Image (cartoon, rainbow, N blue to C red):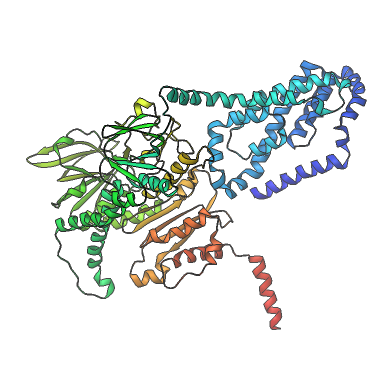
Amino acid sequence: MLKSKKIWLLGVITLVVIGFYAFGLNDYFNLLVLKEQSADFIVYYNANPWQVSAWFFVIYIVSTAVSIPGASILTLAGGAVFGLWWGVVLVSFASTIGASLAFLLSRYVLRDTVQQKFSDKLADINAGILKEGAFYLFTLRLIVVFPFWLINLLMGLTPIKLRTYFWVSQLGMFPATILFVNAGTQLAKLEHVSDILSPAIAVSFALLGLFPLFAKALPGIIRRYKVSKAYKKPETFDYNLIVIGGGSAGLVSSYIAAAVKAKVLLIEKDKMGGDCLNTGCVPSKSLIKSSRFLAELSRSGHYGIKRASAEFDFAEVMERVSSVIRQIEPHDSVERYTELGVECRQGDARIESPWEVSVNGKTLSTQNIIIATGAKPRVPKIEGLDQVRYFTSDTIWSLREQPKHLLVVGGGAIGCELGQSFNRLGCQVTIVDIAERIMLPEDEDAAGLLITQLESEGIELKLQYSIDSFSVENNQQFATLKTKQGEILKLAFDSVLFSIGREANTSDFGLEELGVQTTPSGTIEVDKYMRTSVPTIYACGDVAGPYQFTHTAAHYAWYSTVNSLFGDIWRFKADHRVIPRVTFTDPEIASVGHNEQSAKAAGLGAETTVFQLDELDRAIVDGKTEGFIKVLTPVGKDKILGVTIVGEHAGEMLPEFVLAMKHGLGLNKILGTIHAYPTWAEANKYTAGIWKKNHQPHKLLKLLERYHLAKRK
């Protein structure tokens, strides 16, 4: 119904424009005709001032609203007939009202289609318009070489608010309105419309338009100048690049720099490999593997095996985690990176100036600096915390004595992964979260499936609770939980694990003294090139965000390194569009792009295609039929807006969708790709098949049915 209304409206506008030219009305939008008939217009106006003013006002609005060229001639006519001041009043308001109507027509007819079709490409533009739309519009209005009708149509496709569009247009078009109306009062002297806009005037308007943007950028320019001016720049440099932090972001940054033959120094104060190797991805996935083995044994009946069991020692399982770390350590070692051309030093780095870093008592100079200092687990301030035994995802790996009752605070990815693993290793586990459900950023159905699994394994979930205090009574540790409504629950435990997020490591190495700005969330503020408020200093990884994953740390490290080394030649904007994530619970949850909840919040009109894994042959063979693939697409289109996969090997099935989204491939391309049988990845093809089935060309199929019927006769 809505689509037909839009088509009808577009048809009416098209007929108006065709009629305008068909009846020769365009002949009146001509400077020569205006000059010849201006005297008659003036006489008629003197006899009927309000009638002529009203008709002029309406004609101006309509012609502007349907984007008919000729606003310049109408504006000149306003000056010639009404004089300067009354002409300015009429033209100024008529042009703004007409422009706003054209803006609304464009928004109503075209915006949804354009935004859905080019959503990934328009994300940055939409964000910029929401933040700085008034500045952009004001600049465009003052740079009069841009056709105003085109500005009306294009701005209608953006999320700028109508009231903002109206008053900025009124203000921005006012100088040009005065110029053209005044020229109309001198109509007899004009030979060409272009005479009004001499090169000098056009340049002046352009400079006036650019002034607000320059004024906005000026504080940042001054700040960077002051930062640089406060320190003496070395005449020569010891290094092209110094990287602070030997985690994922720092390792990738230093490797890329060495690969392009830059002289690079990597400084790490603790262990090479950072959180991912030593306290994050590697140890947690090692623990998950051991716990999954035990869980599979408990399901032996599913595979026709009557009984299967295993004896294990908790301390030995934790020792295996440490041994896996030791096996991977050489991949991130000083020796390996030295061989790759990276100079490595261990010690506490301190940034002394935009070009100087000190380490182990020695000050070194560099053209640019990359901060990749990572983040640490957040520990809340709770009454009685110092009396109880608590861990974070950094310190839990020292645990060798099995907790009887582990209290996990936080129902996000880390809390659910580790909570499930320790539960399978024989610990009683309670997960506490203030939210109404666990895994809040993920698809609601995905979280629901995981909740069912966790509870079936005996994990207790205390949702919409927060920890009010800790206490110890008769050598027993207690947590007092409280709801927003004031309900109180006292829970006994013997160890607590905090998994409530991570905070960036930004303190005690010179950032405050240098004036490097941070965001409200505590990460280092970087621009679209990963550059901080100090132009020679870049940041990437968990310390800068916006995503705190190992793979995004490596992703943003590329932009930081290339822009720091080659930014004076060419810069690359960091690409935030297609960011996958995987939670390695059982079942796994893997996702990229939007889910149903985020799409609705973003105002995207999306349809959902779901394939249940219990229909996949490989899932049936493996006895892992719980889960689904859910794909979001624009209505009637096969373009992928987002994917959620829940089930066995979900993380391994996701990359095909990530690749498709990255390179603009739709579900039809996945459907047309051969997938080996029997594999888990076949589920991707079957999902695409369901979408195709739901979008059959029914009219064409009806014709084909008749065709085949005719051939049988």
- Decide if residue 434 is in sight here: no
Q: Which of 491 and 329 is in front in this view?
A: 329
Image quarter in which the C terminus is found: bottom right
Residue 370 locus on image (x, y percent): 39, 38
Q: Tell me what residue is drawn at x 85 percent, y 19 percent.
A: 186
- The answer to whether 456 appears left or right of 600 in the picture is left
Residue 393 locus on image (x, y percent): 25, 46
- Decide if residue 685 is in sight here: yes
- Up-down: is 485 above or below 614? above
- The answer to whether 39 appears left or right of 139 in the picture is right
- Up-down: is 695 above or below 560? below
Q: Nearer the viewer, residue 442 or 141?
A: 141
Extreme residue toward the bottom, this view: 713
Could you say which quadrant of the image residue 204 lies in? top right
Q: Nearer the viewer, residue 266 or 286?
A: 266
- The answer to whether 418 appears left or right of 141 in the picture is left
Residue 569 locus on image (x, y percent): 54, 39
Q: How many marks do you count on the picture? A: 0
Q: Tell me what residue is drawn at x 21 percent, y 74 percent.
A: 306
Extreme residue toward the left, this view: 474
- Up-down: is 51 above or below 473? above
Residue 415 locus on image (x, y percent): 28, 48
